[in-house]
Image (cartoon, rainbow, N blue to C red):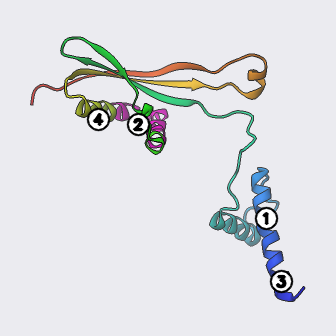
Amino acid sequence: MKRKQWCWLAIALLHLLVAALSAAHLQVIFPRRTLLAQAWQGYGAYTGASNIFSFFAPEIGDEIAVIYTVVDRNGKQMAVRLENNANHERNTRLINIYGFFSVDEARELMAQSCASYMFSQIPQAVLIRVVVVYRAIPPMQDYRNGQRPRWYSSFSRAYRRNTDS
């Protein structure tokens, strides 16, 4: 092989080494303040090779959903879930937005925003209850021992339509 080919091979192997060490959740071997460590971390961050890939994680995060209970002027109630739409991209965006319900400081504002949106979509609604539920997925070992995923409610607020305007 020519010198140029050896150089490209070395660069490719270095890149794979950075990716493999990051995927294995191994810390950089070098002391953190050295120039070599900074270069290693900078290269990994710039190229994406230092991303941590948790394909075989022993547990995964909880699934989140928001259920809206809509009450009209006659007292009739209906439950609505926006992510039941057939558009997969829309559902993914909604679930990402719903993830902000896990931030304590944002929870009330998120619920108000969701209720406001529902009032704009359902003009006959006089009350909208926003209920955030999580599906707790057990770790793999607990699942093997018979434990199954379960839903639990973590937040609930009711909002009335403002009729002053």
> With respect to residue 150, does 33 lie above or below?
below
Pick whichever of labels 1 and 4 is earlier in the sequence.
Answer: 1
Q: Amino acid at mark 1?
A: Leu
Question: Can you say which quadrant of the picture contains the N terminus?
Answer: bottom right
Q: Amino acid at mark 2?
A: Ala
Residue 107 as seen in the image, left or right of residue 37: left
Mark 2 near mark 1, Cβ–Cβ under 8 Å? no
Residue located 75% across and 60% down the image: 19
> With respect to residue 31, does 65 lie above or below?
above
The residue indicated by pointer 3 is: 5
- Which label number is shown at residue 106? 2
Residue located 49% across and 33% down the image: 102
Secondary structure of the residue carrying numbered label 3: helix
Counting from the top left corner in percent of width and height, residue 74 is at 19, 12
Q: Amino acid at mark 4?
A: Tyr
* The residue stretch that appears in magenta: 92-111
Secondary structure of the residue carrying numbered label 1: helix
132 in the magenta segment: no
Secondary structure of the residue carrying numbered label 2: helix
